[in-house]
Amino acid sequence: MIKHIVMFKLKDRNKENIEIIVDALKTLEGNIDVLRSAEIGVNFTESERSYDIVLTTEFDDRNALNTYGPHPNHLPVVEIVRSLCSGSVVVDYKT
């Protein structure tokens, strides 16, 4: 199993932007066959080090993760997130 974790920092952290991104991320599960699970979290701690939203996803293997990136149902979500975020960090690991 592969875990793919992405944390997002919003350009402008407000309720509307959080809802837009969370709603977009929710469209991933069930619409990408290689995606086994997705969990979305909104950070409640405000500090300089904090990121605003986290997405934790699971895949069977690296090939599935590689299929996910360019998947046609993933790309529109990437565009929405990029338009509202100033940055992101990623961790991929095998469990």
Image (cartoon, rainbow, N blue to C red):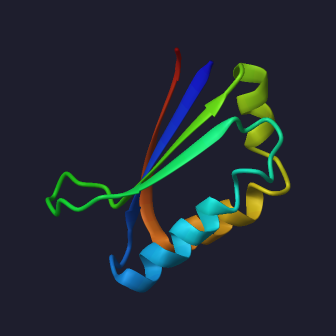
52 lies above or below 2: below
Q: Seen in the image, is 10 located left or right of residue 63? A: left
Instruction: Report the residue at 29% width, 58% height from top.
Output: 43
Q: Residue furthest top?
A: 95
Q: Position of residue 32 (x, y in %)?
A: 80, 47
Find residue 20 and report its horizontal and vertical position in percent.
Answer: 54, 77
Query: Taking 50 as reference, is 83 above or below it?
Result: below
Residue under the point 83% across and 41% down: 33
Q: Is residue 89 left or right of residue 65?
A: left
The residue drawn where x is 44% and y is 85% is 16
- Residue 4: percent from left, percent from top: 55, 34
**Whole-percent x, y for residue 57 in the image:** 58, 39
- 95 or 90: which is nearer to us? 95
Quarter location, residue 14: bottom left
* Side of 47 relative to 40 (left or right): left
Vertical arrangement, residue 94 with respect to residue 50, above or below: above
Residue at the far bottom in the pictured view: 16
Quadrant assignment, res 23: bottom right
Please state which of residues 43 and 63 is positioned toward the viewer in this rendering. 43
Locate the N terminus and report the quarter of the image it occupies.
top right
Q: Residue at x 23, y 62 (%)?
A: 44
Please count the marks in the image. 0
Indicate left or right for 35 with 45 as reference.
right
